[in-house]
Structure formats: structure tokens, C-alpha cells
Image: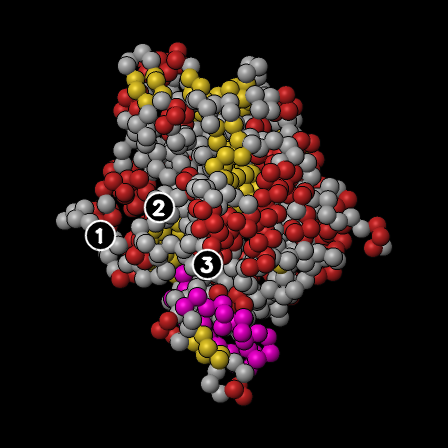
Amino acid sequence: MSDTPLLDQLETGPWPSFIADLKRMAAKKPQIKDLLGQLERSYEEKITHWKHGGIVGVLGYGSGIIGRYSDLPDDFPGLEHFHTMRINQPSGWFYTTAALRMLCDIWDQYGSGVMNMHGSTGDIIFLGTTTDNLEPCFQALARNGFDIGGSGSAMRSPSCCCGLSRCEWSCYDTMEACYDITQEFQFELHRPGFPYKFKFKFSGCPNDCVAAVARADCSVIGVWKDDIRIDQAAVKAYAGGELKPKGGGAHVDKLDIQKDVVDLCPTQCMSWDGSTLKINNRECNHCMHCINLMPQALRPGTDKGATILLGSHAPILEGAQMSWVIVPFMRMEKPFDELKELGANIMEWWTENGKNRERVGELILRLGMREFCLAVGLDPVPQSIKTPRCNPFFFWHPEDFEAEAEGKTYIKL
Amino acid sequence: MAEDRITDIGPPHYEQFLPPVIKANYGKWKYHEIPRPGVLKHVSESGDELYTVRCGAGRLLTTDYVREVCDIADKFCDGHVRWTSRNNIEFLTPKKENVEPLIAAIKAQGWPVGGTGHAVTSIVHTQGWIHCHTPAIDASGIVKSVMDDLFEYFGEHRLPAQVRISLACCLNMCGAVHCSDIAILGIHRTPPKIFHDKLRHVCEIPTTIAACPTGAIRPHPDKSIKSVVVNEERCMYCGNCYTMCPAMPLFDPDKGGVALLIGGKVSNAKHPPMFSRLGVPYLPNNPPRWPEVCQAIRKILLAYVNGANKWERLGEWITRIGWSRFFEICDIPFTFQHIDDYKWAYDTYNTSMHFKF
């Protein structure tokens, strides 16, 4: 009779089985046998058997290690200490096998051999080691060029899409921006000093493959300002069915340019006369639909940068938020000074004003966009709203009247 | 010794991990094709080609598994491989002739090839019972069960658009599933139990009280107990107090379960990004295979496949037909739980005559 009759039922079926994988490891590492045993217990009892985390870490850092202890240490002694280590991933999640094998060797030596590729925020996650292994594991990683990621009320490990490395749509170098910003904020990443977590995510275009708009306090999403580049011959090839929609990734073989592209354009800024596709680019809102459908005919323009959006977080506590536009266009070139300065200003204002466990997006809602914009040096821009307010409850400040007396439209202009 | 310690080096620079064909064509990619499900072909301005074979995986792996990934990447990809934002593994090679043998090697390993274009791709998920202290449900087991059930949609482009499924095992949503076509969410449905003897020793009472978004926690009227009480009618089981105070667990093996939130997306194509909305308020937490969850998801997916126009994401389809029609088509009973009564509830009420019978 198997020790894990419930888990065994997850060994069948076409999708890769994590149970089969863990069982191989259990033959080599007794703590994984315990891990399966405790998981089987959870499957029987429908309840977790991990205790609330404790404070553990490596010297000098307050971040990147999550204490984890079993509440059944007598039954599963290998899980008495089973801490998580977050390892900051390389931009774009590219690896050589030499680097991966090195990571595996270190984790086999110092931990359970169980990992996540990757955690929700983007880090490589090492699941399960003891307190006394944390520091030596960290230093073994550091000697091989890897560092620990963020956790707690700190900057979390930024992440990005693959950007220019393998995508024709990326409007800036997401991987370099992610790397550079991560290096810039190393102190904030390793030493929690914020009201709560702060995440950066970098997507190269409005398709937003890393879900920056939903999952990052600061969402940096690539955009272009000029005209979509058109290859009219390729448009005709799509119309004729020689080229497949979405490069072959769709469930239909042939595009109807009028119905599938022009009619579905959210701004109605396109027209098609059977031989030429025209785009009124000034009215385009860069939604990417036409480009997604015809990757060989259409490409983003060449005057490129990013939109900066701020404020997203999961539902805890006031309800989920998506980030909203605070800077419609920012040039994104190394060394990304403008973004670094804005980021530092935002973090400073938030750290000074935020309550414990209040995300920056919640703080802005509490104190208002005016106070936020003035504090970090941003002007009011219409791209930041869907509609203006519909209530008459707006504030006037003495400086508004002073500006008015000076003939200015608002306090700066 | 401490002086020899290395700290604050940050992640390694990505460039050392890039395949030569990517280094040579960085920023020069011209277009891509998906010649078959699971295979991407990128073509550069220079004419260089890069083939990517996408392989589905859960995010929970052992070093044995990763070494097997390495073996394949060494054999066919000169040692280059990457992961996607949705836990897929991507094998990269400039050699067209390597694509078929690469696919064969992946399949021989028992791993699926797909997840491109109009497919259900790998489920983004959280830890669940394998490693987390707050989950209402497991994560990897439900993901495995749902992907087994929807496997036919992973390796083919049969859907009206891409379908992104994600799972978070409690309301904390460390998986941030709130903008997914289908979000599987573990929910608690009972207030925390308070262990007063423990609380006085391990919790800070002011931060515990402040942690409650509905103001349901207040100091225990008997000051000698040095604990708190919960106004249970106000509690919506978010678990935020438990995050601050380990003496307030809110687990109930019988009443905890799964909610499905649907119709979200992050891309800006056509419609702006959308939140996922409550579709199914409760399904039982039924390991090891969660049949009720699998069936509910399949039913919603099939209704979408049958009803959606070309290119419509699940949320765009529902927006077009209206939620009342959606509930009718999917045979989902409409309940009080579907009507928002939290902070921004008013935004969700219908103030028009635009509805259907």
C-alpha cells in the first residue's frame, strides 16, 4: 500500500506530474519523502500544515528569505525548518545550461532540490532549507554571480518581457531597463524600509506579456508616438490568404481585412479599399490589435519609449487596482535617469506618507492625485484619466488663485 | 569571514545567457510566425532565423527536472533555454533542422509542446499546500487536474483567442490573478478562530486591529485577556489579520473552497485591460482531482468557444452578450455573492435599461 494514495492519482494524465517529479527526489532526499507525506496529509484533511513564517535571513539583508516551518515536525522531521529563498532571476529568464546546472548543484548541496521556475514576481524560488544553510547557500550563489531577491516591505525583484531579445514589437530595451533599475535599487531590494512591497515590471508593448498593468506598482509599458510601419504588399498577402493571421497562431486561416482588422479597430482610424490599408495614425490608440493580426505587414513606429503607469496591486486591501497612466511618454534609453529619478521620488513620497501595509496606489487614492503629482514633480495630463470627475467637489488652493492672478492656466503654466 | 562576503551584486547580467543568434539580432527582429502550435519562428532584418519550441510545465520543479531540461537544451540548442512569464519552457535554436528532433525529444520526456497563439497556455499559479501558510486550497494539484482536462486546447490553436488561466490559493493573490480570462481562487468562508492564550504572546494588538479592512476587529472587552474579538458579521474572510497575527487562523476544511473569476485580461488589444469578475462563487475543495472545478471551467470554456466571435477574448464575449446571458448560457445560478458590496460596488451596478431577459 502506497504512503500517498491521494497524491498517486496525480501521476496519471498528459500534463507533467509534479508528484512523479517529487517522488524521484524523495528517493534521494529524506525531506522530500516528508514533504510528500505532509502534502498527502493536507490532501486528506484539506488544510495546510505550514506554520506562519518566522524571521530568518542572511547577514545584512532583511529580505529574500521566507521562514517556513511545518506544524507536524514530529511526523515530518525533515520539514521542521523548510525555508524559502528567492533568487533574483536574470532579465527575460534566459539561461545557459551551465548556469542552470550550477544553480541545481548549489540547491542540491544546500537545500531540498525543489524549486519554482519561477515565482509569481519572477524570482527563481528555492523551496526548503534549514536556517544554518541559508548563509552558505547565499554565498555560494553570490560567488557564482547570483543574488537574493526581494520580500516583505521592500522593492521586489523587477521583471520584464523578453523585449528586444526576441520580439519585433518591443518599444524599448526591457531587459536592460529591468537590469539597470534592479541594480540601482539594490539597497531598497535587500533592506525593507517601505510601508509595503513595491514592484516594477517592464513590458515592451501594449500587449503587456508580464502583466505589468495588473501586477506592478510601477508599470513601464512600451509605446510608440509616430506612424505604424506598413508593408502594403504583405497586407495584400494577408488579404489573399498567402500569409496566415497571427503568424499562424489563430483558429482561422485567412484574414478578412475589413471585418477582422478595420471594423475591430477601437478608434476606427483605419480604412481598406481592397488594395491599400490606410491608418490615420494621429487617432491610433496603439491597442496592438491590427499589429497582432498581421505581424509581417505592420510594426510599431520608430519614435519609441514607454508609458509609466502607477498603482496596481492585488485585492488586499481596498480591492484590486490596475496601474493608471502618470507619464504618457518617457524616452527609455540607458542609463534611464528619468525613470530612476521619478521612481526615487515616488518611493520617497510614499515612504513618508504611507501607512503600514499601504501600497502606493492606495496612498494616492487616499491623499489625491494633486498631492502626489506635486510631490513627485508631475504635471496634470489628460491621458491619466478615463473621464474627468462628474462631481462638483474640487478643491482650490491659495496657489491656484495666485496663479490665476498672474494669468496662468494652472500653477505651473 | 564577514569581510569576504559578497552582497548587493544583483542578478547576473542577462547578456551572458543569450544565444549568439539573439546577441547578433538584438533589437533587429522583423516579424514572427507560428508555423505549428508550440513553435515560434522569428526572422531578423538580417535574414537570420530563430526557432523557439515552447514546452508546457508547472512551476514546481525539482533539480532533476531542470537537469533534464538542460540535457535537451545541450543536445539541440547549444545550451540555451529560457522560461516565459507563464511557466513555459522555451528551447531556442537558429537551426531549423533541429526543430523536429527537439520536439520529439521533448515529447519523449512526456512533456507537452504548445501554449502558443489561440491556445490555453500553462497556468500561472501559487504555492498551495506544498509551501504556503495561508492557502484555502492546493495549487499544483488543481493546476495539474485542470491542464489534464483541457490538454486538447494546449497543443492546438482552436480557441477564438488566447485563454489565460491562473490560480491563487487564497485572497492574498500572490499570483495576482485578478486580470485573467479564468482565475481559480481559493476562498475561506468562515471568520478567524482566535486563540487568546497564543495571541497575547505573539501578536501586536494595534497592528492586528488596523489590518482589518472592514473594522471588524476590536480589543477584547476584558482587558486582562490581552486579546481581540471579531465582529463576525463584518468579516469577509480576507485573512489579512492572520497575516499580521498567527493566532487567528481562518481555515475550515469543510467550508473553504474555490471561486472562479472570469473575463479579465491585461493586453490592450481592442478593449483596454479588464478585471476578472466573479463567475462561480463557490466550488468544493475536492482533492486530489477537483472534478467540480475542472467541469465548471470546461463548461465556461466550451460556452465561450461556441459563442464568441473571432478574436474575442472571454471577457469581450461576455461584455458583448451581457452577464445575465452569460449566466444563463453557462447555467450558473445568480446569487447575492455576485452583487458587489465592497468598496467600489456602485461602479458595478447597472444604471441603464441595457439588459436582456
Q: Which residue is mark 3?
A: A366
Residue furthest left in the image: B357
Q: Position of residue A7 (x, y in %)?
A: 49, 55
Q: Mark 3 or mark 2, which is nearer the start of the sequence?
A: 3
Mark yes or no: residue B15 visible.
yes
Q: Nearer the viewer, mark 1 or mark 3?
A: 3
**Does mark 3 fall on the same chain as mark 1?**
no
Q: Which residue is mark 2?
A: A388
Check the residue under mark 3 and report the chain it is in: A
Q: Nearer the viewer, mark 1 or mark 2?
A: 2
Q: Which residue is mark 1?
A: B351
Check the residue under mark 2 and report the chain it is in: A
Mark 3, other Cα within 10 Å: few <14 / some 14–19 / many ≥20: few
Q: Position of residue A264 (x, y in %)?
A: 30, 29
Q: Amino acid at mark 2?
A: Pro
Q: Position of residue B108 (x, y in %)?
A: 53, 33
| SS class, disc 2 | loop
Magenta-tinted stretch: B186-214
